């Protein structure tokens, strides 16, 4: 390896399941630039998020710790400014740290260690999305509209945002290339695509002309087929005991893949900017997502579940001057990124500050790729549940547990589609006990539940108080007098998200 600290270009997507990419077996989606990263870089075969929801996943990833340890319970909880992130650590180690795009930061700190932020965020920075386990109510997000209103568009608010993110990121790379700052850089470029709505531009839609859209392996099922948590999610989305028209499913899935192709074009432009500014040789490019997407499997869409399509994310590392092309079998997760970035920087400070839940991925790249039973942990603490839900995976076994819902155990080797719950099967009794012991040793369920409920009550009061009088927003570089195109919670989410320009000709 080179002795000079590498630059790090961290490209992140939103709601991109690993199974959408050819590197993970997809033969339909067209992603030549991402394919190039995979073919000439390191592909982690099984990478997971640690919380299948945007903000908690990102906070956990940035801190290298499970969300419950840092109070990151849902999409509307403050990310504490006292929690060090990879941006803090890298900045302290001598890096210039810069963010272009979405991080879903909630709270007055909209930087969290980033020295420079090139764009605003795209979702509310306040507590307006706070859940309420005591009274769930109806949420104006992620419902049947996502599937029925899908297809090609000329423009959308999400496209406007990601185009802005891309423009500012490329401008920054040219600024760095001009020698404005001699420090190594950490640039995170974070897109909101292919997050629903399932809308893509006509040029990306047309790339799939004449191709048969692959349908879900498992279609919609009756309510009693599903586990308790899945039933709650489907009910929240108005999809319980509901089956979409086949053409709606095909159109939504095609548009999703079209959005992935849009992201692929963005990756190609970023790689070109590295080349044109003589930055490519000493820049490690990392590509991943905050969580996956169900995309109609089991009749489910979006995320908030521990099934593989929603939990699995791509994890690619590309820097041919440092790492040979290879596939890594050892399971990894997003909390592993912070210690990995710090190893590349040559700084071991994080391990001296506090224990982390992640490990340096470089050890698996450099030949120690034999930990197939490495344990992966995830959790879900947000809306559509009545108690914390924990996921622990070891080897081919995935265990999901909640005091209200009971236990689920799936043997992914024999049951890759996670259809048969073997938690009560006598052949798996010892495994179930091991998983129960692991959960008990890593989570204090009673205390965590109390903390979550108190947090929700506090934020409900704060929301009520903040509705009176003048509102001072926390949004980055915005004032209360500004009208911005990004979603800030002052209107219904669907009314904002589906503000798009349709393509007039037939789809």
Image (tube, rainbow, N blue to C red):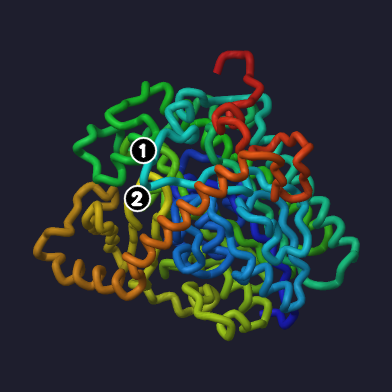
Q: Which of marks 1 and 2 is nearer the N terminus?
A: 1
Left or right relative to 151: residue 109: right
Quadrant, the C terminus: top right
Residue situated furthest bottom in the rendering: 352
Q: Does residue 48 appear to the left or right of 13 in the view shown?
A: left
Query: Given the current orientation, which residue lies at the most extreme top position?
Result: 505
Residue at left offset 63%, top offset 49%: 125
Residue 496 at x, y = what percent? 61, 30
Q: Mark 1 points at which residue?
A: 300
Report how many numbered discs are placed on residues in the image.
2
Residue located 33% across and 72% down the image = 373
Residue 115, image quadrant: bottom right
**In the displayed structure, would residue 492 be above or below residue 81?**
above
Image disc number at residue 307: 2
The crowd level at tag 1 (other Cα within 10 Å; few <14, some 14-19, many 20+) is many
Q: Residue at x 58, y 49 (%)?
A: 13
Check disc 1 and report its element: helix, strand or loop.
Answer: loop
Q: Can residue 54 be seen in this view?
A: no
Q: Where is residue 336 in the image (x, y as percent from the top left)?
A: 51, 70
Q: What element carries label 2?
A: loop
Q: Residue at x 53, y 36 (%)?
A: 196
Placement of the N terminus among the 4 image quadrants: bottom right
């Amino acid at each position: 390896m080179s002795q000079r600290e590498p630059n790090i270009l961290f490209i992140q997507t939103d709601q991109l399941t690993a199974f959408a990419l050819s590197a993970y077996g997809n033969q339909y989606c067209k992603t030549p630039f991402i394919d190039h990263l995979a073919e000439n870089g390191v592909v982690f075969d099984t990478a997971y998020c640690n919380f299948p929801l945007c903000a908690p996943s990102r906070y956990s990833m940035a801190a290298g710790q499970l969300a419950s340890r840092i109070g990151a319970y849902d999409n509307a909880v403050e990310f504490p400014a006292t929690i060090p992130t990879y941006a803090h650590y890298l900045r302290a180690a001598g890096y210039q740290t810069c963010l272009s795009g979405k991080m879903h930061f909630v709270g007055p700190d909209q930087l969290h260690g980033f020295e420079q932020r090139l764009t605003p965020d795209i979702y509310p920075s306040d507590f307006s999305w706070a859940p309420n386990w005591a009274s769930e109510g109806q949420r104006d997000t992620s419902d049947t509209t996502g599937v029925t209103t899908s297809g090609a568009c000329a423009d959308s608010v999400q496209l406007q945002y990601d185009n802005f993110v891309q423009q500012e990121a490329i401008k920054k790379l040219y600024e760095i290339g001009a020698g404005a700052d001699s420090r190594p850089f950490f640039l995170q470029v974070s897109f909101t695509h292919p997050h629903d709505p399932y809308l893509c531009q006509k040029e990306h839609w047309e790339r799939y002309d004449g191709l048969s859209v692959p349908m879900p392996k498992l279609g919609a099922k009756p309510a009693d087929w599903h586990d308790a948590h899945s039933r709650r999610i489907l009910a929240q989305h108005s999809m319980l005991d509901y089956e979409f028209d086949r053409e709606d499913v095909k159109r939504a899935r095609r548009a999703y893949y079209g959005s992935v192709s849009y992201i692929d074009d963005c990756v190609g432009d970023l790689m070109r900017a590295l080349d044109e500014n003589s930055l490519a040789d000493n820049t490690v490019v990392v590509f991943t997502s905050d969580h996956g997407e169900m995309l109609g499997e089991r009749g489910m869409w979006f995320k908030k579940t521990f099934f593989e399509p929603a939990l699995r994310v791509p994890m690619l590392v590309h820097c041919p001057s440092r790492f040979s092309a290879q596939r890594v079998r050892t399971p990894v997760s997003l909390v592993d990124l912070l210690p990995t970035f710090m190893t590349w920087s040559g700084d071991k400070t994080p391990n001296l500050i506090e224990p982390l839940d992640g490990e340096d991925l470089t050890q698996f790249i450099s030949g120690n790729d034999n930990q197939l039973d490495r344990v992966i942990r995830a959790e879900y603490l947000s809306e559509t549940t009545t108690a914390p839900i924990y996921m622990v995976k070891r080897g081919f076994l995935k265990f999901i547990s909640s005091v209200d819902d009971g236990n689920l155990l799936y043997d992914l080797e024999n049951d890759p589609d996670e259809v048969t719950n073997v938690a009560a099967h006598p052949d798996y009794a010892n495994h179930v006990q091991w998983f129960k012991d692991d959960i008990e040793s890593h989570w204090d369920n009673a205390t965590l539940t109390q903390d979550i409920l108190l947090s929700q009550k506090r934020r409900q009061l704060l929301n009520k108080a903040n509705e009176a009088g003048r509102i001072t927003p926390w949004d980055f570089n915005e004032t209360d007098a500004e009208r911005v195109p990004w979603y800030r919670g002052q209107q219904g989410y669907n009314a904002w998200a589906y503000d798009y320009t349709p393509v007039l000709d037939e789809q």
